[in-house]
Image (cartoon, grey):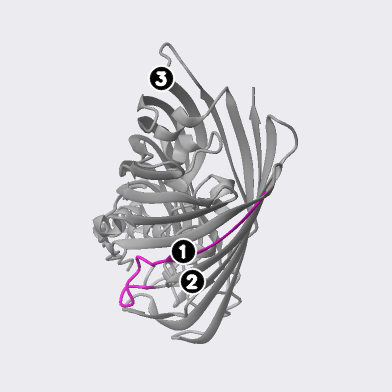
Amino acid sequence: MRFSRSLLAASVGVIFAAGTTQVMAQGFTLYSPDISTMGNAYAGAAATAENASVVATNPAAMSRLDGVNVTLNNTLILAKTDIKNPVGSTPGTNKGDMVPRILVGSAFITFPHVLLDNLSMGIGLYAPFGLKTNYESTFQGRAFGDKSTVTVATLQPTISYAFTPSFSAGAGLTVNHFNGVLTSGVSPAIPKATQELSGARNAFGYNVGFLFSPITDMNIGLTYHSEVEYDLRGNTEVLNTPISGTPYTFNAKGRGNLVITTPDSLELAATYKIVPTVELKAGITRTRWSTISTLAPKSTFTASGVTTSVPLPAVYKNVIAGTLNAGSSSEVVNFEDVNMYSLGATWQVQSNLALRAGVAYDESPANKKDRNVRIPTADRAIYAVGANYALSKNTSVDLAYNYLSESNAHISRADPSKGIYQADFENTGHLIAAQLNHKF
């Protein structure tokens, strides 16, 4: 009986699948939860104080908000992937478009003058990381990755203190819940065999921000989002796998765990009103993906978790469990530190209407050598437009649209147990978002 790779090792790399990076920022980071800055291609996010979403973008900016502010938003993600020039060791399909339509939302509320005149508080619920992919069951590269659903939900209580009218600082504790279901094929030689991992974990992190106005009409913001380490624990499962030398198959259920650390990031941003109705924005974000190089998962199977297609002596189940436990491996990703650069502008057309636009360049953390169907991502350009319309003195609506276009991502993979797979992935995406802001 041969089964050379543990289930968790073969599946877990998909957690870092940026293959559908149309859905997210590079790696598997979701873009800023503030729809107003989305209309500027995220330029100036850490230096902007327009609504309660500053809880996530820069907690120091809460000190610039008057009254109790509430912000609710949703973003519709429409992704498209064309797979061209596929070559594989076995036949299969390459339909692409493995990302379903996705709706991502967030909610924030801030309170001014809590206990002290210069102290503000807030809380937010948002998704800093996530992905969802689902290749067709006959995908030619299925052995290198198949289906994945990974979500990280963050609850962030936050405080901010204004030391002077022009300088404030803020910090928030992030309470994060990581949940995932991941599947992949075992080998092209056994197309019906599948493996699955499901797991969840809670972990803590923090955000820190500073906001400074050196001159009138200029803001400079700095925000740091900490890394968060998750010791994932969950279930592993192998289905429809042949027992070597027999016409029979087996299923196996076990336990697995993996330590995953989502990367930290540092954003520097600035905004400046060149005239009372026009504001320029710029930003750069550095994300330290190099902390992720090799994933080393562990899995444990027992004979009691093994079932065979026909009754077999107990010794077979012991051998199967032992072989699964001995088949450890690691997933090499070798991510690199990356930058995202953004420029934007906002034009206050009328007292109740503002128009926005921006462009950004987002680098991919995946290097060419280690890129595969789980990380078929390349450097990306973002083109954005947006608007803010005031429904009343205290209520406004933000709308934004992003078009994402990546350079060609070539994949060339070979593995003794999985065969070979080569293809060119061309990724594009559309993000359509709306946000409601209200001040009490």
> In whole angstroms, how far apart are the C-alphas of marks 1 and 3?
53 Å
* Residue at figure coordinates x 42%, y 39% from the top left: 58
Circle 3: element type: loop
* Image quadrant occupied by the C terminus: top right
**Where residue 178 sits: x, y (%)?**
43, 42
Give the extent of the magenta segment. 354-371
* Image quadrant occupied by the N terminus: bottom left
In this rendering, would 13 be left or right of 22? left
Question: Are the residues tagged 1 and 2 within 8 Å (C-beta)?
Answer: yes
27 or 112, which is in the foreground? Answer: 112
The residue wearing badge 3 is: 118
Numbered-mark total? 3
Which label's residue is closer to the chain start, 1 or 3? 3
> In whole angstroms, how far apart are the C-alphas of marks 2 and 3?
56 Å
**Residue found at the very far top of the displayed protein:** 115
Quarter where residue 225 is shown: top left
**Where residue 293 sits: x, y (%)?**
25, 61
Three-letter code for the amino acid on which mark 3 is drawn? Asn
The residue wearing badge 2 is: 142
* Residue at figure coordinates x 34%, y 37% from the top left: 210
Mark 1 crowdedness (10 Å alpha carbons): few <14, some 14-19, many ≥20: many
Quarter where residue 313 is shown: bottom left
**Where residue 179 sits: x, y (%)?**
46, 43
